[in-house]
Amino acid sequence: MNLWLFILMLSSCDIRFILLVLFLNLSLLLINIMIDINFYLILSAILFAIGVIGVLVRRNAIIIFMCIELMLNAVNISLVSFSSFLGNSSGQIFVFFVMTVAAAEAAIGLAIVISLFRNKETLNIDEINILKW
Amino acid sequence: MEQTIISLKNFIPECVLIVTILVCLLADLIVRKKSAVVAVIGIAGLFVSGWFVIGQFGVKESVFFGMVVIDPYSVFFKLLFIVSTVFIILFSLASKEIKDSTHTNEHVYLMISLTLGANLMASSVNMLMMYLALETVSITSYVLAGYMKKSKRSSEAAMKYVIYGAASSGIMIYAMSLLYGYTGSMNIFEISSILSKMGGTNPMLVIVMVMILAGFGYKISSVPFHFWTPDVYEGAPIPVTGFLAVTSSAAGFAVLIRFFSVTFLKSTTMLNGSLQIIDGIRWTEIIIVLSVASMIIGNFVAVWQMSFKRLLAYSSIAQGGYIMLGLVVANQQGLTAIFVYLVAYMIMNLGAFYALIMISNKLNSDDINDMKGFAYRAPAVAVGMGIFMFALSGIPATVGFVGKFYLFSALIESNMIWLALVGMMNSVVSLFFYIKVLKYMFLSKPDEENSGKIYYGIAGYVLLFILVIPTLLLGIYFGPIVRFAEMSAVMFGLK
Amino acid sequence: MLESYIPIMLVLSFALIFAVVMINLSSLLGPSKPDKEKLSTYESGMEPIGTARERFSVKYYMVAVSFILFDLEVVFLYPWAISFINFPKAEMVYSLIVALIFIFILFVGLIYEYKKGVLKWD
């Protein structure tokens, strides 16, 4: 799609026309840009970083667990994309195991959250501070 | 199919453990509470499994399509784990904290599951298997740390442990996925051969290494990843604390040593007994930093601790630092020294935790202030504790000295004299806080209101005696453990 | 190089402007006659009872945990089920036995849960 033609279309004030062109243009874009492995890896790195920052910054235990799940899912994306890039299935097998381990960890984590909440009536990890130094 | 069946023959010890777990789980539903049947079944299963493990000595085979290997290295660790689990189950029968908790038998099969995970950690050579085994150990230890449901401390410890453990294993598998993408394989032998072809100049490899260290380092509570250790040790019931200190951290060492000395070494290793590190990946330097930091922080912070469990936590951080010194040497001798040290570490730590269980059963506290004049009230236990404390600090004629002696001589022989000096100076510092406990026990008078004699059952004394004997005997007559360690320091795939 | 990204930028900015304008336009132009019925919570046509922000019973949590575990363990059966047809005849029984062992271990867990009274609702 020629850029100048595109701007010309935008400047012609018929909204239906512009929408039509946009729609065509968008589908062309999606076909034309080959989405290679780097995109997936960048997505996975961003998700992983969000997860790590969440674990470090958030103060609610449940949200921390959610951030840990986010980290594990970032790992899954990276494993699957490597696996399809290399044509090697062991990465996808790893993903199955990461998923189940994440579920087990979530179950145990929630059980511990419940027992902590019954004892202390709070989930703010700043108030979970009997043990220190 | 044929390969799986052949593999199963080499996998009998683990299968026995799995069956034991299932039988214990079902037995727990049938027998009434407060009965030792489940523990007896568990210990019997562990003995059977140990019998099969001994039968594997000398085998060098890769089973289950290169997931797991059976070699003298893994057999050594499996025996270590099984012996310590038997002791820990006996301790938990004696412990008041476990007895008073609402569920009385669950710890037996949780502990055996932890042993199963630890056995797999020692023998896995595939990153997938390493991660799974590590998580088996982690998840069961989260549950064990929060075993006392009614106790605020216990559930707080479990909470901290689960957040810390889950986050660091997440970081570890992210690095594993990057390593997989870089080399295209999960098997550490294949990764090693691919890396030695490519050379280690890619800076990503250093990041990957540090991130993987976060996962393994949290298991061995090495310094930048040690923050959970004191809190979890203090909050968890004492038998569980002992279990974490011995089995869980030894399992961490098993997988750490295997991972680093297989993955980042040239596949043509062991020229003249020394391992060749792949160019550009200088992992020994990272390990030196971690090890020195662990020793210094562990020993110096322990000096101020007034809770015995926290003191033992910092002490085990420092001991982890000593063990890592053996990894720095990266040759056969270093591995032998690590094995000797691990045997010593297991015996003295089990002893110290058992003595602590005996003390806190009667005092209901692990504060050192409450132990004033304990030697006047229960002399045998205090003397036992004294022996274990001396062993932990490495006084000659105890097993702790043998371990330290082999480590430092391995360091000196490979010209790392300054590291050996740092280690020795740390031992001197550690002497200070181990003796502090004894000073409270032996030199100060007990308070007026509680100065009565304390008596234990005969079984308690027998168990203490069983632990004191090897601590002293192996300190003088250490030929057998050294020979055992030399025989075991053989890894699959490394000549 | 960078020029080829300008269409994406234009698409994104146009989409943003379009969305914002449309949403605000509807609130500007549309009639607004709120009454009590319209403002109340939509609860599948029923009269709403109580507040939505109350604590759930811990029983739901037990079911949720069992669900997570048993639901996700089944993930291992999918690859097995798909590759089952492709096994040679001789190995079919063997692979069935392997899967049954896996299910048996899960079943022991279920028995344990049942006996401990987790599945009882009251």
Image (cartoon, rainbow, N blue to C red):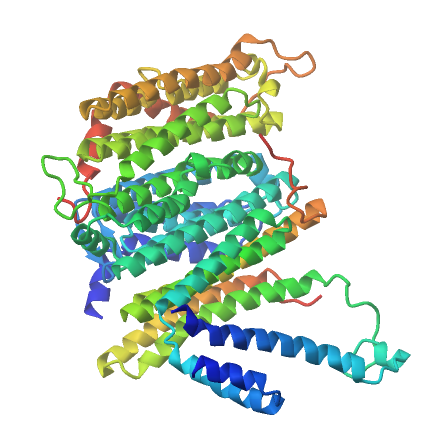
- Whether residue B120 sits left or right of residue B91 in the image: it is left
Residue plotted at (54% across, 66% down): C68
Q: Is residue B441 above or below residue B367?
A: above
- Position of residue B339 measured from the top left corner of the image (x, y, whole percent): 27, 33
Residue found farthest to the left: B272
- Whether residue B369 sits left or right of residue B136 in the image: it is right
- Position of residue A89 measured from the top left corner of the image (x, y, whole percent): 30, 69
Q: Nearer the viewer, residue B74 or B272?
A: B272
- Which quadrant of the view contains residue B334? top left
Q: Is residue B207 above or below residue C79?
A: above
- Whether residue B352 sits left or right of residue C57 in the image: it is left
Residue plotted at (43% across, 31% down): B317
- Whether residue B234 sits left or right of residue C41 in the image: it is left
In the picture, the quarter occupied by the C terminus of chain A is: top right
Q: Is residue C101 above or below residue B311?
A: below
- Position of residue B201 measured from the top left corner of the image (x, y, whole percent): 24, 48
From where the camera sits, is residue C121 visible? yes
In the picture, the quarter occupied by the N terminus of chain A is: bottom left
Q: How many marks?
A: 0
- Position of residue B226 measured from the top left corner of the image (x, y, whole percent): 47, 36
- Which quadrant of the view contains residue A93? bottom left
From where the camera sits, is residue A104 visible? no
Q: Is residue B84 above or below residue B186?
A: above
Residue found farthest to the right: C35
